[in-house]
Image (spheres, rainbow, N blue to C red):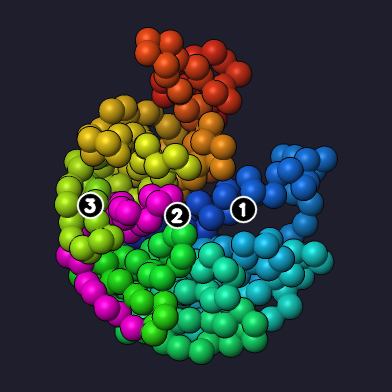
Amino acid sequence: MNRHTGFRGYPTVGGRARRVMLGVTATVAMVLGMAGAAAAAADTVIDTIPVGDGPEGVAVTPDGSFVYVPNDDDGTVSVIDTGTNTEVDTVTVGNNPRGVAITPDGSFVYVPNDGDGTVSVIDTGTNTEVDTVTVGNAPEGVAVVTPDGSFVYVTNSGDGTVSVIDTGTNTEVDTVTVGDIPQGVAITPDGSFVYVANSGDNTVSVIDTATNNVVDTVTVGATTQGVAITPDGSRVYVANGGDDTVSVIDTATNTVVDTVMVGDFPVGVAVTPDGSRVYVADNGDNTVSVIAIDRCLGSLCFDFGSLTGSGSGSVFS
């Protein structure tokens, strides 16, 4: 096993939070996406599924049929059938798999292997590893560019870069230098920009996918980790574990327009499909903070999803 002990110079909890981030964020997204189908079981654990050793991330196929879970400690990916909630397959990948992303057509799964600097490509038709792509040092975060899924962006926390993988050839076609210890990664709905959370220098790098150049750098809170973008692409929410806040970035100006206090050591963040709420995983106190997103028409603002009638940045845990 090749576990990293944490951020360079950061406490061990940072390393733990870093690894938890992807799993919690994706889990929230999965639960939200399936909420309509399981409304009767809201806020209730209806099943527990044994998987491999040290599960990290989680991703659901576009049709909702299968869930893929990378298991950090045994170098495998568990495949769960959502119809029966059972593990139906196990795929051997690289060392310390952590992140996971699925192409929009559901054909392939991309898994960064932190321990050996590679990304495993799994064919969902056969559940076998069909390719391995060498990337940078300690890859963790991964996102597929929408809507055609032509490229995958992988954050390499060990060398401050983002690898760009061409999904047609499964080769690294570009490397983008970003900030220190990049962690979370998210892509705007139109695929134009990539936002990368750099935990080592408290910034967010903005990459233009047309040129694969960093076109802006936004200073946010301390020890930034998770990042998520609203469905309309207008706002980016960044979880700052070091100061218990979430920074809100306006994508039109790439400036922080709001800072929201949340729970202890927030690491993961996800936005609901309707763009009404943001869910933040607070690793330090085992809570999830819920932020109601405002929508404003001139001077009139509506607090969608909030039951409190509060204004911008309302939070309840």
* Disc 2 target residue: 21
Q: Which mark is residue 30?
A: 1
Cα separation, mark 3 vs mark 2, equals 18 Å
Place of residue 6 in the rendered image (x, y in percent of width and height, measured from the top left): 31, 62
Residue 179 inside the magenta-drawn segment: yes
Along the horizontal axis of the image, is 188 left or right of 54?
left
Residue 164 in which image quadrant: bottom left
Which of pointers 2 and 1 indicates the residue nearer the eye? 1
Give the spatial CA distance, label 2 vs label 1. 14 Å
Start and end of the magenta stretch? 171-198
Quadrant in which the N terminus appears = bottom left
Magenta stretch contains residue 136: no
Judge whether 3 appears above or below 36 on screen. Answer: below
Q: Which residue is mark 3?
A: 205
Which residue is pictured at 54% across the width and 23% down the height? 304
Amino acid type shown at disc 1:
Met
- First along the sequence among labels 1 and 3: 1
Work out whether mark 3 precedes mark 2 in sequence or the reverse, and give the earlier one: 2
Residue 171: image tag: none
Q: Main secondary structure of the magenta part?
A: strand
Look at the numbered discs 2 and 1 and tell me whether their residues touch, using CB distance below 8 Å. Answer: no
